[in-house]
Image: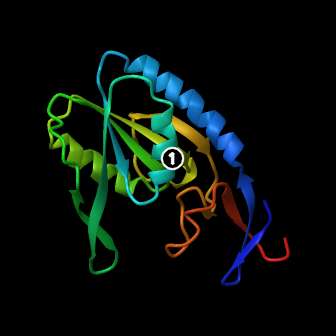
């Protein structure tokens, strides 16, 4: 893992794929144990979650279903507004739902995802996120049950996380550092 320079930004190795795999294995064991008799539905929030979701599902050894959603948004007067959730495709009535996120920072997207899924009459919603930035949270959540890694307010790329659509394919996670640092 070497440093990466992109458009005057420098990124250094932060979390290795080996660390990620170990943490996902433990999360998979916990989820499989807790939801053994509940037939949960895993809902991955695209685009960033795709690598995490794929690796997580390999560690789930109980009957379950999965789907992916995307948040549709529009630009409002001064910020991006989330308008709807697209793509569930499964009847979620009275189901245990586990939202799979790449990163929870402000919590804005997660709040809208939870609200949209609650309108589907789910039984319970739990959140599983690879990364969480506690210092950035603008909302209180009592259902974030599985967190891979807590990080500071850092700009990260790799393992599904992008910079202008690029670098999602890196298997390790990199964080931005000051050039020359």
Vertical placement of residue 38 versus 41, above or below: above
Location of residue 120 in the rendering, given as x and y in whole percent from the top left corner: 15, 41
Residue 148 visible? The answer is yes
Give the residue drawn at x 58%, y 31%: 25
Left or right of residue 108: residue 102: right
Give the residue drawn at x 45%, y 36%: 57
Residue 103 visible? The answer is no
Vertical placement of residue 131 versus 28, above or below: below
Location of residue 156 in the rendering, given as x and y in whole percent from the top left corner: 62, 62
Position of the N terminus by quadrant: bottom right
Q: Which residue is mark 1?
A: 52
Seen from the viewer's position, the closer of residues 142 and 8 is 8
* Residues packed near mark 1 inside 10 Å, few (<14), some (14 to 19) or many (20 plus): many
Seen from the viewer's position, the closer of residues 74 and 38 is 38
Position of the C terminus by quadrant: bottom right
Colour scheme of the rendered structure: rainbow
Give the residue drawn at x 51%, y 47%: 52
The image quadrant of residue 18 is: top right
Vertical placement of residue 106 versus 40, above or below: below
């Amino acid at each position: 893992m070497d440093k990466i320079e992109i458009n005057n930004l420098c990124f250094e190795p932060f979390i290795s794929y080996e660390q990620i795999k170990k943490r996902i294995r433990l999360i998979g064991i916990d989820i499989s144990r807790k939801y053994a008799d509940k037939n949960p539905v895993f809902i991955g929030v695209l685009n960033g979650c795709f690598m995490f979701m794929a690796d997580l599902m390999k560690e789930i050894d109980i009957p379950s279903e999965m789907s992916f959603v995307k948040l549709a948004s529009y630009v409002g007067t001064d910020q991006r507004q989330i308008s709807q959730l697209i793509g569930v495709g499964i009847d979620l009535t009275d189901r245990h739902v586990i939202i799979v996120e790449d990163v929870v920072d402000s919590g804005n997207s997660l709040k809208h995802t939870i609200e949209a899924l609650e309108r589907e009459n789910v039984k319970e919603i739990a959140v599983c996120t690879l990364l969480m930035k506690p210092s950035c949270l603008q909302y209180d959540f009592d259902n974030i049950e599985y967190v891979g890694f807590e990080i500071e307010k850092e700009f990260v790329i790799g393992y599904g996380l992008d910079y202008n659509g690029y670098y999602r394919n890196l298997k390790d996670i990199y964080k931005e550092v000051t050039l020359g640092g």
